[in-house]
Image: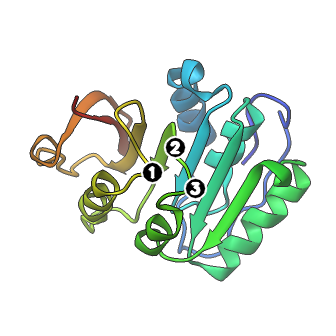
Amino acid sequence: MRVIAGSARRLQLKTVEGIGTRPTTDRIKETLFNMLQNDIEDCSFLDLFSGSGAIGIEALSRGAEYAVFVENNKNAVKCIKDNLMFTKLSDKARVIENSVLSAINILNGNRVFDVVFMDPPYNKNIEKEILEKLIKSNIIDNKSLIISEASLDTDFSYVSDMGYEVIKEKLYKTNKHIFLKKKI
């Protein structure tokens, strides 16, 4: 796994050993950031269920002003910190070792994030719980873009009732990205 573009381009990132994390492939990551290219520069980026930190590091490498990484796996947290040091991006990052729900509470009142990316475990309906927590928080606003990586069969039909609108959906062979914003 590598950083695709920006200041840390071509640097190889460490990955978390074992089957507890599911790294986003370089091809999918490249497609995602091609779609986000106009949203990344100088943004505040929140990477939920960070794993190795590859998505947030890619955002920082491409010009994000600041990124927060949320991960509750100790080995993954160490991996994120190592990758941030290796890419020389630590000064633009904060790593929170906690559950995503607790981290949203911790972050509440500190800043509004321009982009929120979440890649929770597949097929456990965790997205719904996180989206409920986010919409009630003050860490997102009407301009915030929320992206959820999920299995192809994950249902997002409920998001409109929560106060979100689906901006875009990108399907891949085995998963998808759903792009959401708060309804105005």
Residue 175: horizontal and vertical position, in percent?
36, 45
Q: Does the residue at mark 1 contact the one at mark 2 (Cβ under 8 Å)?
A: yes
Tell me if residue 29 can be seen.
yes
* Total marks placed: 3
Residues at marks 3 and 1, CA–CA distance in whole angstroms:
25 Å
Residue 64: horizontal and vertical position, in percent?
69, 35
Residue 107: horizontal and vertical position, in percent?
52, 62
Q: In the shown orientation, is residue 112 left or right of residue 69?
A: left
Q: Quadrant of residue 182?
A: top left
Q: Residue at x 53, y 74 (%)?
A: 20
Nearer to us in this view, 146 or 83:
146
As drawn, 141 above or below 95: above
**Amino acid marked by disc 2:** Phe
Q: Residue at x 63, y 39 (%)?
A: 26
Residues at marks 1 and 2, CA–CA distance in whole angstroms:
6 Å
Residues at marks 2 and 3, CA–CA distance in whole angstroms:
23 Å
Q: Quadrant of the C terminus?
A: top left
**Amino acid marked by disc 1:** Ile
Q: Nearer the viewer, mark 3 or mark 1?
A: 1
As drawn, 179 above or below 23: above
Answer few, some or many: residues within 10 Å of disc 2's Cα (few below 14, many 20 plus, some between 14 and 19): many
Answer few, some or many: residues within 10 Å of disc 3's Cα (few below 14, many 20 plus, some between 14 and 19): some
Image mark for residue 113 = 2
Q: In the shown orientation, is residue 146 left or right of residue 81?
A: left
Image mark for residue 139 = 1
Element under label 1? loop
**Which residue has dot 3 on it?**
23
Element under label 2? loop
